[in-house]
Image: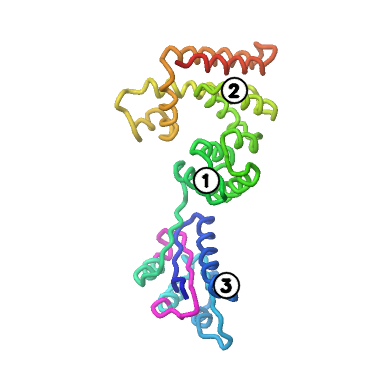
Amino acid sequence: MSVEPIILVVGDEELLAERAVGEVVASVRAGDPETEVIDLAPGGLEPGRISELTSPSLFGGGKVLVIRSAQDLGKDLTAEVLKYAETPADDVVLVALHPGGAKGKALVDGLTKLKARKITCPKVTKVGERVDFVRAEIRNAGGKISADGARGLIDAVGNDLRELAAACSQLVADTGGKIDDAAVARYYRGRAEVSGFTVADKAIEGQLADALEQLRWALATGVPPVLIVSALAQGVRGLAKVGGAPRGARGASLAKDLGMPPWKIERVQKQLRSWSADGVARAMTVVAEADAAVKGAAADPAYALEKTVAQIVAARG
């Protein structure tokens, strides 16, 4: 059998752990389509069951034994698994899933010492890791997305990897593969955060036509004008905060001082290359006027927002 006989999947990112198991099963069945897959949980296991399942069968055929929640096996079953792992059967692949942590660590340590193949599936907690995940998902589905587009999708969908994976697959199917900020806004147009911040980013970067297009999308799909102004205000304030930071400050220290994630600071620093201090000040005034306008001072909030976007673009330089 070409697949390692003992495989240890460690980590609490469920989607990645499930995929790891699926890849093992697919690899085994590529050589033997009739391979039987048996799911096991500690609650339904009795001493001797592992030995029984791994014994040679009169009818032949391979097996994949998947032990879930292996941290709950207990002392006796852990010893049984480790004893089996010393001399595994030729036609059996044993996969043990452990979430990590101290509970049941004897199994992890024992299988590691026995040179089991180890697949790590740690929880994805950092923004950069989720961006990489989204871009890889899109790429594997045959599409392409920028880092900024991936961040926009995360802002829209949330941090759950299962939901992100489903969204990536759907976006590639719906768009034909090339996914940009406009596509994200279009298919997740009910998400006010994405719509508003996309308008702000486009305006700050001087992309007037794109900013107006995104603004109209947002308004047409029911995003309240006050939320769009809020996004514009945050974008302009971001320019002021990063532009006013002490020279030489960088990295985690700068992120902590400004209360902004590193990726956002990096993006704002790029945007600042086209802005002067006077321009930022003018943009802040424009946004303050827009806030008053959408809260009752203007007869037509949509027109007021279009004018605001144009003025922010004009303030650059």
Mark whose residue sits in front, 3 or 1: 1
Q: Which residue is mark 3?
A: 37
Q: Which residue is mark 1?
A: 134
Coloring scheme used: rainbow
Q: CA distance from mark 3 to mark 2?
A: 55 Å
Confirm or deny contact between disc 3 and disc 1 (CB under 8 A).
no
Tag 1: amino acid: Val
How busy is the neighbourhood of tag 3: few (under 14 within 10 Å), some, or many (20 plus)? some
Magenta region, residue range: 85-105
Q: Position of residue 313 (x, y in %)?
A: 52, 17
**Residue visible at 50% across and 61% down?**
20
Q: Position of residue 42 (x, y in %)?
A: 52, 70
Q: Which residue is mark 2?
A: 209
Tag 3: amino acid: Val
The answer to whether one can see residue 40 in this image is: no
Q: As drawn, which residue projects farthest toward the left?
A: 248
Nearer to us in this view, 104 or 20 = 20
How busy is the neighbourhood of tag 2: few (under 14 within 10 Å), some, or many (20 plus)? few
Decide if residue 309 is on the left or right side of residue 85: right
Looking at the image, residue 57 lies above or below residue 114: below
The answer to whether one can see residue 226 in this image is: yes
Q: Secondary structure at mark 3?
A: strand
Mark whose residue sits in front, 3 or 2: 2
Sequence-earlier tag: 3 or 1: 3
Sequence-earlier tag: 1 or 2: 1
